[in-house]
Image (cartoon, rainbow, N blue to C red):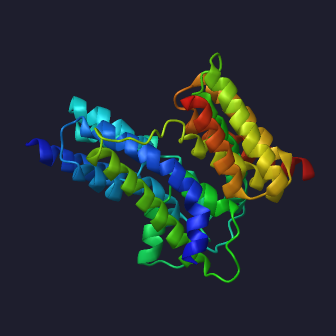
């Protein structure tokens, strides 16, 4: 097996495996059907997943270094901007700009 | 519509571009031609899995192991689909692409934003997905092509993903206005962080969904 064919096979296998995880729920449950439990899960996953994703993003930060301080400040800027102006793009750009300037100083 | 979609997906651009570039640079070290990084961004299109693949390709890991690892690494998508069952419209090529392009970022956007009234929702979602993947493919290609000659310092740009999820979390709070799912998710995150630091993402999603179902069951028993 040459190197390129190994790479192509890996890509094929990964494409199928990734697509399977994304496609499965749509195959298992048809839309519009009354399924109280599925509807309950569907309604509650977005707020839960968003909470978990934020914590997930913050778990890799080294809190005993300046990185922790910068992250805290950038997060604060993002939240404050968003609560005052409620413009998602503005809040994200402001927070990211503050963070980039801080870590590159 | 395109202008509105670009504005909505701009945070994803800030997140995907530097991450894609990082992947491209890493991929380039394996010694394959640069366009294979592009190809991987087009057909695999999964951030964490692609980074994992670089390590596995380098080590020459077997296909079966790669398939299983990829499946488990991405298995959180199993739950993402549930929240979007009714939003992707009728079966067709577009729906297959919407499902193919489901990532943490597009899922977060689609379940939180309200599509402007003047636009067709499925077309709007389609463009969100298409643009997001283009940013990713662009990043992978730039990284692999220009790994040695990149001037712009993107360090810290990846904070955009954290900021995006934070903003969407606030939006979810303004929409849901019930503390329970947030509290359950926070608790689950803390527990799974202690138990499985590396794999907390999937573990926390499974634990929080299980918890909230159990809570609902207990509540309905009480009402009987």
Q: Residue furthest left?
A: A1
**Residue B185 percent location from the top left of the image:** 72, 40
Q: Residue at x 53, y 51 (%)?
A: B14
**Residue A36 percent location from the top left of the image:** 72, 63
Residue B217 visible? The answer is no
Judge by depth and name the residue closer to the eye, B16 or B110: B16
Judge by depth and name the residue closer to the eye, B108 or B32: B32
Question: Residue B187, located in which quarter of the rendered image?
Answer: top right
Q: Residue at x 24, y 41 (%)?
A: B63
The correct choice, above or below, for B183 with respect to A62 in the image is below
**Count of marks overlaid on the render:** 0
The correct choice, above or below, for B118 with respect to A96 in the image is below
Judge by depth and name the residue closer to the eye, A86 or B78: A86
**Residue B109 percent location from the top left of the image:** 62, 59
Q: Residue at x 61, y 72 (%)?
A: B4
Residue B112 visible? The answer is yes
**Residue A77 percent location from the top left of the image:** 75, 41
The correct choice, above or below, for B152 with respect to A17 in the image is above
For the C terminus of chain A, the quadrant is: top right
For the N terminus of chain A, the quadrant is: top left
Q: Residue at x 45, y 75 (%)?
A: B94
Q: Residue furthest top?
A: A64
Question: Residue A88, located in which quarter of the rendered image?
Answer: bottom right
């Amino acid at each position: 097996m040459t190197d390129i064919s190994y790479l192509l096979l890996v890509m094929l296998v990964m494409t199928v495996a990734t697509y399977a995880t994304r496609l499965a729920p749509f195959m298992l449950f048809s839309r519009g059907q009354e399924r109280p439990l599925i509807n309950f899960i569907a309604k509650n996953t977005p707020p839960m997943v968003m909470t978990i994703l934020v914590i997930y993003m913050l778990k890799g930060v080294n809190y005993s270094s300046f990185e922790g301080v910068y992250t805290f400040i950038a997060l604060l800027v993002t939240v404050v901007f968003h609560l005052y102006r409620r413009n998602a793009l503005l809040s994200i750009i402001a927070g990211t700009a503050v963070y980039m300037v801080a870590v590159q100083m | 519509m395109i202008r509105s979609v670009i504005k909505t997906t701009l945070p994803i651009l800030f997140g995907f571009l530097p991450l894609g570039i990082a992947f491209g640079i890493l991929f380039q070290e394996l010694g394959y031609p640069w366009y294979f990084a592009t190809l991987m961004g087009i057909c695999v299109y999964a951030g964490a899995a692609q980074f994992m693949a670089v390590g596995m390709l380098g080590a020459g890991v077997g296909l079966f192991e790669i398939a299983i690892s990829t499946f488990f690494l991405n298995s959180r998508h199993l739950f993402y689909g549930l929240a979007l069952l009714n939003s992707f419209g009728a079966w067709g090529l577009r729906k297959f692409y919407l499902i193919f392009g489901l990532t943490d970022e597009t899922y977060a956007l689609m379940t939180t934003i309200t599509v402007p009234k003047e636009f067709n929702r499925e077309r709007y979602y389609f463009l969100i997905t298409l643009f997001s993947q283009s940013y990713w493919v662009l990043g992978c290609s730039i990284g692999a092509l220009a790994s040695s000659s990149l001037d712009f310092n993107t360090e810290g740009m990846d904070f955009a993903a954290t900021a995006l999820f934070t903003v969407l979390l606030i939006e979810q709070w303004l929409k849901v206005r019930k503390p329970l799912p947030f509290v359950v998710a926070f608790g689950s995150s803390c527990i799974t962080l202690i138990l499985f630091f590396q794999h907390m993402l999937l573990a926390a999603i499974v634990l929080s969904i299980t918890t909230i179902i159990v809570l609902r069951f207990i509540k309905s028993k009480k009402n009987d």
